[in-house]
Image (spheres, rainbow, N blue to C red):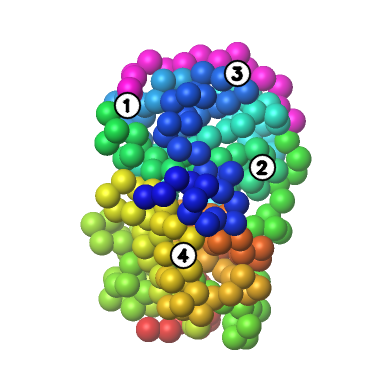
Amino acid sequence: MPDIAARGYANPSVLVSTEWVAEHKDDANIRIIESNEDQLLYPSGHIRGAVQVDWAADLNDQLRRDYLDRAGFEKLASKIGITRDTTVVFYGDKSNWWACYAYWVFLLFGHTNAKVMDGGRLKWEKEGRELTRDVPAYPPTSYTAPERDDSRIRIFRDEVLKKLDGKTRLVDVRSPQEFSGERTHMPEYPQEGVLRGGHIPGAKSVPWARAANAEDGTFKTAAELKAIYEDEQGLKASDDVIAYCRIGERSSHTWFVLTNLLGYPNVKNYDGSWTEWGNSVGVPVER
């Protein structure tokens, strides 16, 4: 795999290598953040100095189906000891699927000084790099966040309904079985109560994991990504694109790829995704 700078990405600076993290993890203006699907991974061993941001407990409102509000984000950011000037570097399991989810939520609050460690936990572990169980303690900060801005990178169900005009490109990043309606949930995952299977009319099936290399979790080159999204599916950088999955986590990974690696300026994540669409009365469904 070529170095990050040689892969042809539109914004290569959004990725850092495991080597870079090993060299910079102790820098005062850097905060390494681990975010996993498996919540037991961090306590079992993590990059020295890394803090854990749990997708369910830390990033989501515990009552409403929504993300934390401004006050909640300020509390989280202060707890992990960051300021608006801190560079946050996300990594995690599942080829950085949840790391990209956390990255996307941080961007909702305008913390754009953010990067992802290419390859995530898998690459770090395969290289035999150090993991520790020591949990760091950073002095709390006084973080002031802007109001959460959903308009730039997030879209809601009623807006999606208005976009079913053939002009907006929808990318369904779930498994082919979910897309077809054969399943209403991911293989090997519990059923989450969706009443209808299928996909949003006009959506193209591009499973999220196709963007990553299975052997080490790194992102594929820009040429390989263009072959998937543009040559196969006909997407263009000028398109308005909506990515969706089940609850917005897998589609955050695809949003990251299209936005940062291919440079598409108009990509939004429909995080209501199929758990909302498949339970909504009267919305159109294709199989």
Q: Residues within 10 Å of mark 3 (few under 14, many from 20)?
A: few
Q: Earlier in the sequence, mark 3 or mark 1?
A: 3
**Residue bearing the label numbered 2:** 112
| Of marks 4 and 1, the one in the foreground | 4
**Residue bearing the label numbered 3:** 28
In magenta segment, residue 142: yes
Q: Amino acid at mark 2?
A: Thr
What residue is shown at x 72% (from left), y 51% (from top)?
Answer: 149
Dots 3, 2 in contact, CB < 8 A: no
What residue is shown at x 52% (from left), y 24% (from top)?
Answer: 24
| Of marks 4 and 2, the one in the foreground | 4
Left or right: where does residue 183 sit relative to residue 162?
left
Choose top left, top right, bottom left or bottom right for residue 68: top right
Mark number, residue 223: 4
Q: Residues within 10 Å of mark 2 (few under 14, many from 20)?
A: some
Mark number, residue 129: 1
Q: CA distance from mark 4 to mark 3?
A: 36 Å
Dots 3, 1 in contact, CB < 8 A: no
